[in-house]
Amino acid sequence: MGSNDGWTGRDLARVAVFAAVIVVLGMVGPIPGPGAVPITAQTLGVMLTGAILGARRGAASVLIVFLLVAIGLPVLAGGRGGLGVFLGPTAGFLIGWLPAAVVIGLIAHSGLLTWWRTGIACLVGGVVVVYAVGIPVQALSAGQPLSLAALQSMAFLPGDVIKAVVATLLAVLLFRAYPPAFPDRVRARRPVSAA
């Protein structure tokens, strides 16, 4: 491990800021969705967190949000918090944020941060991974067939794809406009533009 793998004070600040971004996006409020799962903007925050901070730092941001939820702070959409949210029908979609941030970070930061790599990362991590965790938990919790839970979740797909596109655009634009928002090893891959 090189010296670039260590966390700096700036990294800790980034982790805290992106935990706050996820929380703030919960203030938008949930939109009732099919089944028991509401539509929220917080998954957009998870996608941005993974795409900008990478796997480890993105996961740390999500874990901070989980800690805030667990101690009862109303940081989820609709002012929800407490241990009970980790047990209901939406629990899988919430728990899916952690592997989503990791997968997004691993894919997006696997090379030069480009729009196509970031887009794939947000779609795979922010949609496929979250659904892969969320749908089975919803089916189990609601006592319904997996196929019904999957069908109900398809109503969220267009919105989640839009969130992935928005996260991709924001991450790539931020990378071009303000590279210090990204970890050192990602910035080191940035091509030097001609003056």
Image (cartoon, rainbow, N blue to C red):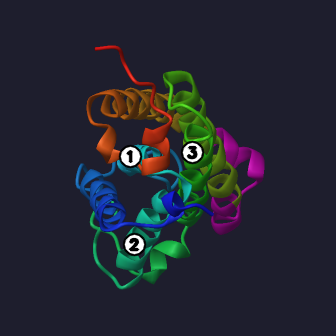
On residue 182, which mark appears? 1
List x then y, in percent, for residue 14. 32, 58
- Would residue 94 appear left or right of 27 to someone viewing this image? right
* Quadrant including the N terminus: bottom right
List x then y, in percent, for residue 95. 56, 65
Q: Give, as a single range, the part of the protein colored magenta.
A: 137-152
The image quarter in which residue 144 lies: bottom right
Q: Amino acid at mark 3?
A: Ile
Question: Of tags 1 and 2, which is closer to the observer?
Answer: 1
The image quarter in which residue 124 lies: top right
| Magenta span includes 143 | yes
Label 2 secondary element: helix
List x then y, in percent, for residue 164. 47, 33
Crowding at dot 3, Cα within 10 Å, few <14 / some 14-19 / many 20+, comes out as many
**Residue at (45, 31) in percent of width and height:** 190
Residue 55 visible at all: yes
Crowding at dot 2, Cα within 10 Å, few <14 / some 14-19 / many 20+, comes out as some
Q: Which residue is mark 3?
A: 104
Label 1 secondary element: loop
* Quadrant including the C terminus: top left
Q: Amino acid at mark 2?
A: Ile
- Measured in 3D between alpha carbons, the distance from the residue under mark 3 to the one under mark 2, in whole angstroms, is 18 Å
Question: Of tags 3 and 1, which is closer to the observer?
Answer: 1
**Residue at (43, 67) in percent of width and height:** 7
| Residue furthest to the bottom | 71
Q: Which of pointers 3 and 1 lies earlier in the amino acid sequence? A: 3
Q: Is residue 78 above or below residue 31?
A: below
List x then y, in percent, for residue 116. 56, 23
**Residue at (50, 35) in percent of width and height:** 189
On residue 64, which mark appears? 2
- Measured in 3D between alpha carbons, the distance from the residue under mark 1 to the one under mark 2, in whole angstroms, is 19 Å
